Image (cartoon, rainbow, N blue to C red):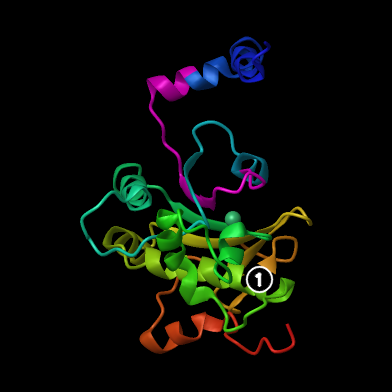
Amino acid sequence: MPDELLDRLRRFTTDAFPLQRSLFKHLVDDGQHPTTLFIGCSDSRLVPYLLTGAGPGELFLVRNVGAFVPPYDQSQGFHGTAAAIEFAVLNLQVKRIVVCGHSHCGAIRALYGEVPPAAQYLARWLDLGREAALPVAEPGPEVLRRTEQRAIVLQLERLMAYPMVRDRADAGALTLHGWHYVIEDGEIHVFDVGVGQFVPASQADNAGTGPYQRFTEADALDYSGVPMVDDSHG
Ligand SMILES: [Zn+2]
């Protein structure tokens, strides 16, 4: 029986790898020096290398359901995403952190529905997005999109509670970027904290404003401009 996955592995070694052999040798000899920590949803339609044109060695990737950032609470446990953030900032000293959500995100939709009873880790994990959900029972496309965007801003806020992130951002050595990838349009919308909105990359004059301005207590209540409710028409 043909094993298609095995065929693909062999083709990588014979076809793809030789084209980048010297690059990989360089990355082995000199080590990796990625400048960007990319925290993206695990969704199979989100392809960071395609979106950014990055090659090997450029992106330090963290993928999880919803592109969520756990709170920095130093509680006991296995926090893969938090560990990756610490490693990227403290060891690799990345210059940028991108949080990338997307349209038609199953994690965001799940905030308005049920998850299978057996999916207890998933149910708990989705708590990291609940603050972004709007008070509607049957979310339409516009509500879902706004929830996706609000969730991205929420994760940026959480990132700023990581001491090593805050310190480097305050020092101007690290910028944070919120991206919302609209799959059907093939376009990223970048969060501009100045206007408090996501702006299509085609119309933006930056890749997301940074260093990210920390919210004050009062600002945090309205997600710095990402409109809160008023979704009666949505
Ligand atoms: Zn998703």
Q: Position of residue 148 (x, y in %)?
A: 60, 67
Identify whether 16 is placed above or below 178: above
- What span is in magenta? 25-47
* Picture quadrant of residue 202: bottom right
Identify whether 32 is placed above or below 150: above
Judged from the image, the secondary structure of the residue bearing numbered disc 1 is helix
Mark 1 surroundings: few (<14), some (14-19) or many (≥20) residues within 10 A: many
Reply yes or no: does residue 35 show up in magenta. yes
Q: Position of residue 185 (x, y in %)?
A: 79, 57
Judge left or right: residue 91 versus residue 186: left
Foreground: 40 or 35?
A: 40
Point 38% across, 27% down: residue = 31
Foreground: 74 or 118?
A: 118
Foreground: 175 or 80?
A: 80
Q: Is the residue indicated by label 1 positioned so its CB lies within 8 Å of ligand 1?
A: no
Point 46% across, 44% down: residue = 35
Q: Quadrant of ligand 1?
A: bottom right
Q: Residue under circle 1?
A: 144
Q: Position of residue 207 (x, y in %)?
A: 60, 59
Quarter containing the N terminus: top right
Question: What amino acid type should be assigned to the residue bearing mark 1?
Answer: Leu
Point 42% across, 60% down: residue = 125
Look at the image and tell me whether residue 97 can be seen.
yes
